[in-house]
Image: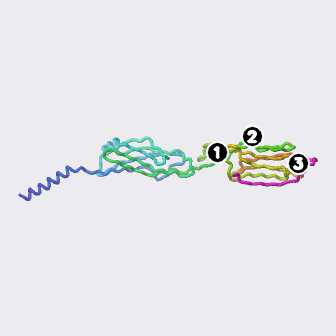
Amino acid sequence: MKLISFTFAIILLFSCNKHNTEEIYIYELNVIGNTIQVFSEKGEEREYIIQLTSIPDISTHEAELFLKSSKIDFMAENHNFFFSDYVVKDNAIKFKIRCKENVNKKTVDDKISITVINQKFSLNETFDLSQASSDIRYEYKIESEITKKFTFPDEGGLFTIPLKSKRLKYINGNYALEEPCSLKGVRYISSCINGAWVHTDRIYNGKAVGDYIIELNATQPFNVDGEFSWSIELLYNELSIFHLEIIHNQTPGDEYYIGDLTRFNSEIIE
């Protein structure tokens, strides 16, 4: 009889402890979607799902109630990706992530963080996303009132030709912008064949960014034997971005012979 009473007391104590102990749940967030493949350099939008799971399992209805009563925050650490159209259904948060066109030559990396907080749990899930580098191409654009050919009067003189240097930017083959730019790194080539010692030229900076002046000097008439040729060219990556032929008529029969000159100058603009 004593043995039966003792056994019943143990069973009763175990039963009471079981009812007085709240069951412990472990909650987790899991990402569903393509996080490995880089986003297109031209911009892209993808759909993702954050799924709420628990041990022990809870019903999808309970999970939906938890999520709908939660504070849900989305964040991209470097602000390269954007969130939209999130909706809670069953045990999942469906949302979209998009990125604009990459305007850099480098791959864009970012860390995505999603936080879900309520009275039952505080959960955070992070994952990395990246966007492919873009093809960035530049073209020089040289503007001047005088192009292709400049003719000196027979008596010569000192003349200046203003230039405006601009840079056109293309992103993934599409025009993006135009802006004034320096000619630093561009090659300036001057070629004068069978000219006179008075035939000189130079290029120098103007007052504003992108403003340049070509100075041409032929301070007097001349008369030499042979064919005269004078030209100026600007080269960027071996591509001609400006070419000018300079003409100075000779005066045969007059005593303006100063001696022939062949001069070739090639320099990088600093």
- Secondary structure at badge 2 equals loop
Quickly name the residue at label 3. 222
Q: Position of residue 225 (x, y in %)?
A: 90, 52
Dot 1 amino acid type: Leu
Find numbered disc 1 in the image and state the secondary structure of the residue it sits on: strand
Q: Along the polypeptide, which appears first: circle 3 or circle 2?
A: 2
Q: Earlier in the sequence, mark 2 or mark 1?
A: 2
Q: Are marks 3 and 2 in contact (CB under 8 Å)?
A: no
Q: Which residues are magenta?
A: 249-270
Question: Which residue is labeled 1 in the image?
Answer: 168
Quadrant housing residue 265: bottom right
In terms of sequence position, does the residue under pointer 3 or pointer 1 come before the other? 1
Which amino acid type corresponds to the residue marked 2 in the rendered image? Glu
Give the residue at the far bottom of this rendering. Answer: 3
Q: Nearer the viewer, residue 213 or 68?
A: 213
Q: Quadrant of the N terminus?
A: bottom left
